[in-house]
Image: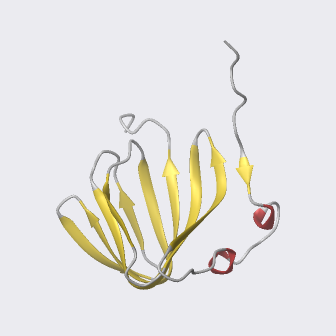
């Protein structure tokens, strides 16, 4: 069986130069737009732009994730706890805990997924 090469994706706008995160992803009416900045075996970094009222329904992930709010405001539910987040704030979504995101207004976030072992704390 042939082993696949490790996949690395880096968007050109960020490769070796400073970039404006907010400007790298645009809003779309009644939609959620995502743009992968980096995709490596150790983790991913993805930008999201949510139009007002858009949501990611409750789900779980096998990996810890960090959300950095870049613009706007949203409600993020992690387990039983709901938090209103806005530009400049950060929130951690632990592996295995159900979570959801709903944009109360247009909202941009940077999601960093850490694919290391979450039990190695």
The residue lying at 81 percent from left, 67 percent from top is 17
Q: Is residue 104 above or below residue 13?
A: below
Spot occupied by residue 111 in the image (x, y as percentages of width and height) = 51, 62
Judged from this view, the residue extending furthest toward the front is 30
Spot occupied by residue 99 in the image (x, y as percentages of width and height) = 30, 59
Spot occupied by residue 8 in the image (x, y as percentages of width and height) = 71, 44
The residue lying at 49 percent from left, 38 percent from top is 116
36 vs 15, left or right, is left
79 vs 39, left or right, is left
Judged from this view, the residue extending furthest toward the top is 1
Q: Quadrant of residue 102?
A: bottom left
Spot occupied by residue 45 in the image (x, y as percentages of width and height) = 59, 57
Q: Is residue 15 above or below residue 105?
A: above
30 vs 93, left or right, is right
Q: Quadrant of residue 66?
A: bottom left
Q: Quadrant of the N terminus?
A: top right
Q: Is residue 60 above or below residue 4?
A: below
Q: How is the image coloured?
A: secondary structure
Q: Quadrant of the C terminus?
A: top left
Instruction: Count up the numbered dots.
Output: 0
Q: Quadrant of residue 83?
A: bottom left
The residue lying at 79 percent from left, 67 percent from top is 13
């Amino acid at each position: 069986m042939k082993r696949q090469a490790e996949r690395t994706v880096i968007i050109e706008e960020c490769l070796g130069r400073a970039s404006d995160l907010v400007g790298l992803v645009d809003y779309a009416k009644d939609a959620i737009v995502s743009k992968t900045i980096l995709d490596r075996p150790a983790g991913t970094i993805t930008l999201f732009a949510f139009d007002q009222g858009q949501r990611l329904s409750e789900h779980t992930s096998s990996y810890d994730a960090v959300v950095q709010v870049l613009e706007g405001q949203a409600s993020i539910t992690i387990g039983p706890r709901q938090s209103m987040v806005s530009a400049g704030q950060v929130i951690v979504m632990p592996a295995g805990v159900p979570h959801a995101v709903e944009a109360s207004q247009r909202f941009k976030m940077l999601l960093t997924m850490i694919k290391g072992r979450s039990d190695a704390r």
